[in-house]
Amino acid sequence: MQAPEKTLNAIFPQPEEQTKLERAKAILGDLSKSYSDEKLENLVSDFEYLAESWLDLFEKESFEGMTLRELLKLA
């Protein structure tokens, strides 16, 4: 499991047998029918990338240019 996914799962625990695509469809409800599975997977991937990028920027602003992951490795 990748680090961003671990972080999201720690905040929003989900059953392991449910895939990202299934979770996205459950969250979006009827709106998910507007997208193909491939497009929805791309949207989820893009969202995860943006969330991690924004979180890294926030952490660097808050912790003198370092992310929490970098700080924890130093400790």
Image (tube, grey):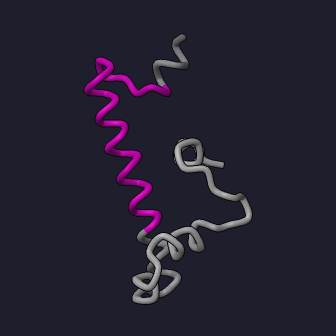
Relative to 10, 69 lies left or right: left
Q: How many marks?
A: 0
**Which residue is found at the position 29% from the left and 23% from the top?**
62
Q: Is residue 49 above or below residue 64?
A: below
Residue 71 placement (x, y as % from top left): 46, 18
Taken as a whole, is the magenta stretch helix, strand or loop? helix
42, 7: nearer the viewer = 7
Determine whether, in the image, residue 17 is placed left or right of residue 53: right
Residue at 45%, 88% in the rendered image: 33
Magenta-colored stretch includes residue 49:
yes
Does residue 63 show up magenta in the picture?
yes
Looking at the rendering, the stretch of residues picked out in magenta corresponds to 44-69
> At which x and y percent is residue 55?
36, 40
Image x and y of residue 13, in percent: 61, 50
Residue 60 in the image: above or below residue 55: above
As rendered, which of 54 and 74 lies closer to the eye? 54
Residue under the point 58% across and 48% down: 9
Give the residue at the far right of this rendering: 17
Extreme residue in the left direction: 61
Q: Position of residue 73 (x, y in %)?
A: 55, 19
35 sits left or right of 2 in the view: left
Question: Quadrant of residue 43 in the image?
Answer: bottom left
Q: Nearer the viewer, residue 20 or 2?
A: 20
The C terminus, quarter of image: top right
Q: What residue appears at the point 58 percent right and 66 percent down from the top-left corner?
A: 20
